[in-house]
Amino acid sequence: MSTLKYISKYPQQVKDQVIQLVEDHKLSDYLLNKYPTTHPYVNDKSLKEYTVSIKNEYIKRSAPLSQVMYDPKIHVIKNALGLHTVISRIQGNKLKRKNEIRVSGVFRKAPEAFLRMIVVHELAHLKEMEHNKAFYKLCCHMDRDYHQLELDMRLYLTQLALVGDIY
């Protein structure tokens, strides 16, 4: 199944469970029971406030964020769900860095837990650029259910690929 591309790196046992949910047409029921509502952060301003509040709670000393926004092109073009970019500019004799976070437009209408997982992931890149042990430790520090949320978010993307929107 090409729709299982989101969970391709998971153990076969997990893939088998997902295949069974898909075949029984119960994947959407699983997701809706676990995450019944969507979040209220539907515009860029509210997304930035949400992101900055998480950042200020867990990684206050990191570089400030200059921009946080939904980007409808990320999922299609970059094959990503969120992007953290650093833009460096020379202003006079100083080098200025700007941190930007872009979240895929897919998450504009999704459960808050999935949006939080993406935001936590991108915020962790402020401290750790690579996906290493320290990176995932920081993600789990900001959200202790990070790994379960990542799996469930991948199941959500699988459901979207199968039949489209469920919310």
Image: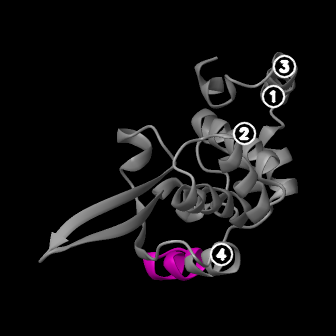
User: Measuring 84% from the left and 26% from the top, which residue is drawn there?
Assistant: 14
What's the amino acid at mark 4? Ile
Judged left or right of residue 1, residue 69 is left
Q: Name the residue nearer the viewer: 88 or 142.
A: 88
Residue furthest to the front: 93
Which quarter of the rendering shows the N terminus? Answer: top right
Question: Disc 2 to disc 1, how far (Cα)?
Answer: 8 Å
Q: Is residue 46 above or below residue 113?
A: below
**First reached walking from the N terminus: tag 3 or tag 2:** 3
The residue range painted magenta reads 41-51
Q: For the residues carrying marks 4 and 1, which lies nearer the camera in this image?
A: 4
- Describe the element under mark 3 as helix, strand or loop: helix
Mark linked to residue 54: 4
Question: Disc 4 to disc 3, how far (Cα)?
Answer: 35 Å
Mark linked to residue 126: none
Which quarter of the rendering shows the C terminus? Answer: bottom right
User: Measuring 84% from the left and 30% from the top, which residue is drawn there?
Assistant: 21
